Amino acid sequence: MRNNAKLIRFLAEQKMLDEPALSEELKTSVYADLPAWKGFLRLLLLSLGLGFLACGIVFFLAYNWADMPKAAKIILAAAGVVVPVLLALYPTFTPLVRNGLMTTGAFMVGGLFAVLGQIYQTGADAYDLFLAWWIFTLLWVILVDFDWLWLLSLVLLNTTIGLYAEQVAFDWSSGTVWLILLLVNLTVFIGFSYVGEKIRKKAYSSIFLLILALATAMFAVVSFMSELFEPSHDWTVETLLVLVPVLFMGCGYLAYRRKELAYLAIVAISLIAIGTSLIIYMSDDIEGFFLGSVWVLATTIFCSFQLNKLRKTWRHDQ
């Protein structure tokens, strides 16, 4: 659908489609119809069903923990992993259902490790659980190559890094941790964008890439604010305070050149947040909060008008 929209936009720019033809092409190739809404509802209900099933098993174990024997706890947790994976091997299910079942199995691996650790009191730190969870599911994440399974794996990776810094790497400064998280998520976002466009037969979903972009922007903004108000007093301070604004300006330029409105909105919101933090930092009193409020209001209105103007220009919405 996205490629069809780009083709229609190109034809409209070249004046090769008149208004009636353009309207018809938009209805048939771009706008969501009844089958598209059915597909969305199928995905939504499948996600909710499998998610509630996995959460139900976890809550059942937690609520009945004291009354269940060790064998029952392990069998139930293992069944949460094995049964969805075995069902996913049946070719009668659609690829979407099979990928959803594999994602459920990967999610339940964490529950199985938690049960084993609680029963046998291994004494492992929390980061060990998430690291093992990430490592043991990484192979089937790569083989299945499903967007939301990748998202689960990335959440585990970020959690592992954060817990490792908190529980083991005591000599790491906060700036070092934020810089690592920023670089990891930025690399992941660039990698998935490149692989989806150049190598993979089918591009990753736009929602998945937007979530990665939002996560990267969040780490960038939080790392900038953290080093601005509570500097680590090492080399990461200058690195983050310079890298983050340059990164956002570069991303904004690329988004403008590629006509990606959603990414431009993410950059705009991030720059507004960074500007607000700078104003409050330079004038940490009532006057600073007042100027920060005026800045947020003015820049939000300005960006809204400019983004809407670009939307009309790019989508020929006169």
Image (cartoon, rainbow, N blue to C red):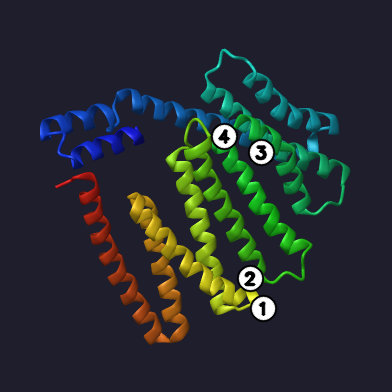
Type of amino acid at the residue the image marks with label 4: Gly
The tag on residue 234 is: 1
Question: Residue at label 3?
Answer: 59
Residue 317 visible in the picture: yes
Q: Which mark is residue 51?
A: 4
Instruction: Point out residue 211 in the picture as x, y percentages from the top left corner.
Output: 48, 48
Q: Are marks 1 and 2 in contact (CB under 8 Å)?
A: yes
Rounded to the nearest angstrom, the CA distance separating label 1 from label 2 is 8 Å
Q: Which mark is residue 175?
A: 2
Q: Residue at x 54, y 77 (%)?
A: 228
x, y percent for residue 147: 54, 37
Query: Rounded to the nearest whole Å, what is the CA distance between mark 4 and mark 3?
Result: 12 Å
Kindly check if marks 1 and 3 are in contact, taking CB atoms under 8 A apart as contact. no
Q: Nearer the viewer, mark 4 or mark 1?
A: 1
Q: Which numbered disc, 4 or 1, marks the residue that appears first in the sequence? A: 4
Q: Are marks 2 and 4 in contact (CB under 8 Å)?
A: no
Residue 189: x and y in percent read 53, 49
Tell me which residue sits at (34%, 75%) in the image. Answer: 293
Neighbours of disc 3 within 10 Å: few (<14), some (14-19), many (20+) = few
Q: Quadrant of residue 11?
A: top left
Assign a secondary structure to mark 4.
Answer: helix
Describe the element under mark 2 as helix, strand or loop: helix
